[in-house]
Image (cartoon, helix red, strand yellow):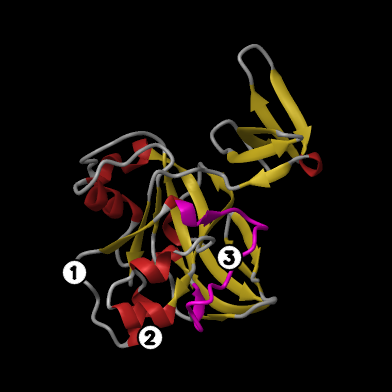
Amino acid sequence: MELDDKIKIMGRFKYEDKIFSGYIKDNHAIVERELYIDSYPLDCVSLLVPVVPSKIICVGLNYVDHARELGMPIPDEPILFLKPPSSVIGSGDSIRIPHQSTRVDYEAELAVVISKRCKDVAASDADDVIMGYTCFNDITARDLQEKDGQWTRAKSFDTFSAVGPWIRSGIDPSDLGIVCRVNGEVRQDSSTKNLIFDIPYLIEFISSVMTLEEGDIISTGTPPGVGQLHCGDVVEVDIEKIGVLKNPVV
Ligand code: MG
C-alpha cells in the first residue's frame, strides 16, 4: 500500500506481552519511541482493536437507500444512541450470540475516530478533530430492540461493537464503497455518498450535545440489506480505502 507522511494507517499491536500503538507501513508495525523507532514485521505482532473509546456514538437511519428500503421518512435530525466501551472487539475476535436473543443482526458502518477532546465544533472545522476512519459492525439483537422499545439492551452486549482492523487517515470519506459479506456472500453494498447527514454535520451536531474525547467513535449508520447472523458465520465489513473488518460468530 502506498503511503506518504499525510496518509497513515494507525493501529494497536501486541508483541509478546507488550501492547503499543503505532502505524503500519510496508507490512511492518512502526512504533515511534522517544529516541528511536521500533519496527516489527506485521506477521510477528497481533493486531488489536485500534482504539479504546470512552464512548461510541451511533447514528440510526442515516442512509437514503436504507430509509427507502424501510419505507421510512428521511429524518430531519440525526437519531443518536450510545454503545458502551465494554462491547468493543477488534478484527478477528469472535461475536458471541447471547442466549437472550434469537435474532442477532450485522450492520456494516463507516466510523470516525476523534483525535482530541472537543465541544461545539463547527462542521467547517470537523477535520481538525478527526483522527481517521475505520470499519464498524453495529451488532444488534433485533428481537430485543423491537421488544424493549428503546435500544440500550439490544445494542450493548459484550462483543456487539466490532471495530477495525485499523484507522486510516488522509482519505476523503464522502464517497467510499461499503460492503458487508457473510460467509463470502455480499449482503450490503452501498456508498457513503448515500449518507443523509455527512460526517462534518454529524460532528457539529453531536459535539453540540456532548464533549467528545480522544479515541471516541462516531458510527455513521448502516446501508440497506441488514440481516441475521448465525453461529459459525464469518462476517466482514469492507470499506474502500480502509480495509476489511472480519469476525467469526460463536
Ligand atoms: Mg447501526
Q: CA distance from mark 1 to mark 2?
A: 18 Å
Amino acid found under the numbered disc labelled 3: Val
Q: CA distance from mark 1 to mark 3?
A: 28 Å
Beta carbon of the mark 1 residue lies under 8 A of ligand 1: no
Q: Name the residue that disc number 3 marks.
A: 237
Q: Position of residue 243 (x, y in %)?
A: 62, 56
Residue lying furthest top: 35
Mark closest to the chain's N terminus, 1 or 3:
1
Amino acid found under the numbered disc labelled 1: Asp
Nearest the camera: 16 or 246? 16
Magenta highlight range: 86-106
At 69% from the left and 38% from the top, the residue drawn is 14
Beta carbon of the mark 3 residue lies under 8 A of ligand 1: no
Q: In the rendered image, which quarter is residue 196 located in?
A: bottom left
Q: Residues within 10 Å of mark 2 (few under 14, many from 20)?
A: few
At 33% from the left and 72% from the top, the residue drawn is 61
Mark closest to the chain's N terminus, 2 or 3:
2
